[in-house]
Image (spheres, rainbow, N blue to C red):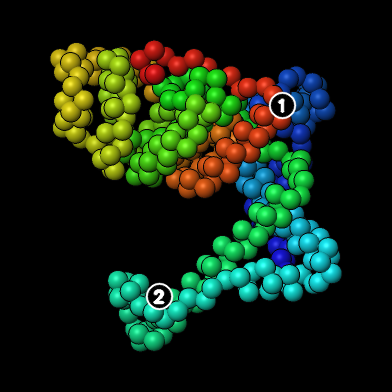
Amino acid sequence: MITRRFITPILAAVLIVSAAPYALASGAKSGGKPVATVGDGAITEAELNEALGSRLMRLRTEEYNIRRATLDQLVTERLLRGEAARRGITVEELTRTEVDEKVTAPTREEVEPFYEATRERYAGASKDEAIEQILTGMRRQRSAKRMTEFLNQLRAATPIQVLIDAPRATVAANGPSRGGADAAVTIVEYADYECSYCGRAAATLKKIESQYGDRVRIVYRDYPLASHRGAPRAAEAAHCAGDQGKYWEMHDRLFSKGGAIAETDIQKYAGEISLDLPAFRECLASSKHTATWKAAHAEGASVGVQSTPTFFVNGRMLTGAASLEAFSAMIDEELERASAKRVPVKAAKAPAAAR
C-alpha cells in the first residue's frame, strides 16, 4: 500500500510564496490589488509579479514535482484498486499474483561472478554475507521492474489524463541549435564548458538527438560560472569556431575535456577541427563574441538559472545532469501535449553559423 508523505518544509514555503497569483510565461501587467502602500501610492500585486519575473522558478518547479509525484502515487493506487476489484481480489493478492509470482528469484550461481568482480565493495563482510546482500538487491530490482511493467499495462488499458501543468518560463531560444527548426519540443540548455556535469549532459543530449530526431530542437546558451576561469574563453572559442561553420565541433571537444580548459587545449582543438588558425586567433583576440555569451548569461539568470547545467524543456525547468529517462518522460509529455493541441511549437531561427 502506498502511503502519503507529510508536506516538506520547502513545499510549505513554496505554497506560501505561491498563494499570490504569479506570471511566468505570460508576464504581469499593471493593475490588481495592492500588496503595499507607499505614502498615497500603492504597489500592486501585478507590479510585484513583474519584478519577480522567473526568479522563483526553482521553487515553483519543486512544488510541481512534489505535487506530480503525489498525483502519480494516487493514480497508481487507483489503478491497482480498480484492477483488484475487477478480479474480485484484494490489492495484496493482485500484487502477489502479478508481481511476486512472476519474478524469477536470482540464484547464488548468478551472483557469484558479480561478487568476484566487485568484492572490494564488501570489505568487512564474509562472502556469504556479501552474496546475500547482492541477492536481496537483485530481488528488489526484479520486483520493481515487474511492478513497472504491470502498471504500464494498466495505464495502457485505462484512459488517464493529467490536468495539472508544470510552471513554464519564457526562455530565449536563439543560440546555436541542432534539430528541427519547427520541432514540437525545444530544449534550451544553459551550461559551462568547464562543468563536468555539463559534459555528462552533453552525452545524454546526443542520445536524445538520436532517439527523437527532428521532433526535438536543442539550443545551447552560455552560462560560464564565476568559479571557472577558463569558461568565458571557451565560450569565445566556440563562437569563433562558429564563424567558420564549426561551432558544434568545437563545442563537443571542449566538453570532452571534462574540467579546466587551458589556452593550449583551445588551440589544440582548433587544429583538430581544421580551423583557419590565424583567423581563429584574431577572433579570440578581438573578444568579438563577449557580448554574446554575457547576454546569454544575463538572460539565464533572469529566468532562474543558478547552476549548470540547467535545461528548459518547452519552458519547464530541469536541473543537473538528468538521466535520459528523466528527459524522455518530459519530452514524451510535451510531444503528447503538442499533438493534442495540434499546434506546433515554433522555434526561433538559428544563426547560420550555428546550424
Q: Position of residue 283 (x, y in %)?
A: 24, 15
Amino acid type at image mark 2: Glu
Label at residue 349: none
Q: Is residue 114 above or below residue 285?
A: below
Query: Going 43% across and 25% down the picture, which residue do you hit?
Result: 178
Quadrant showing the N terminus: bottom right
Q: Is residue 141 above or below residue 53?
A: below
The residue to which callout 1 is attached is 341
Badge 2 element: helix
Query: Going 43% across and 23% down the picture, which residue do you hit?
Result: 177
Q: Position of residue 301 (x, y in %)?
A: 50, 31
Q: In terms of depth relative to the viewer, which is nearer, 33 or 288?
A: 288
Q: Quadrant of residue 124?
A: bottom left
Amino acid type at image mark 1: Lys
For the question of whether residue 236 can be seen, the reply is: no
Q: How many marks?
A: 2
Q: Position of residue 57 (x, y in %)?
A: 61, 37
Residue 199 located left or right of residue 286: right
Query: Going 49% across and 15% down the picture, which residue do you hit?
Result: 349
Badge 1 element: helix
Label 1 vs label 2, nearer the camera: 2
Residue 176 located left or right of residue 94: left
Label at residue 110: 2
Q: In terms of depth relative to the viewer, which is nearer, 310 or 38?
A: 310
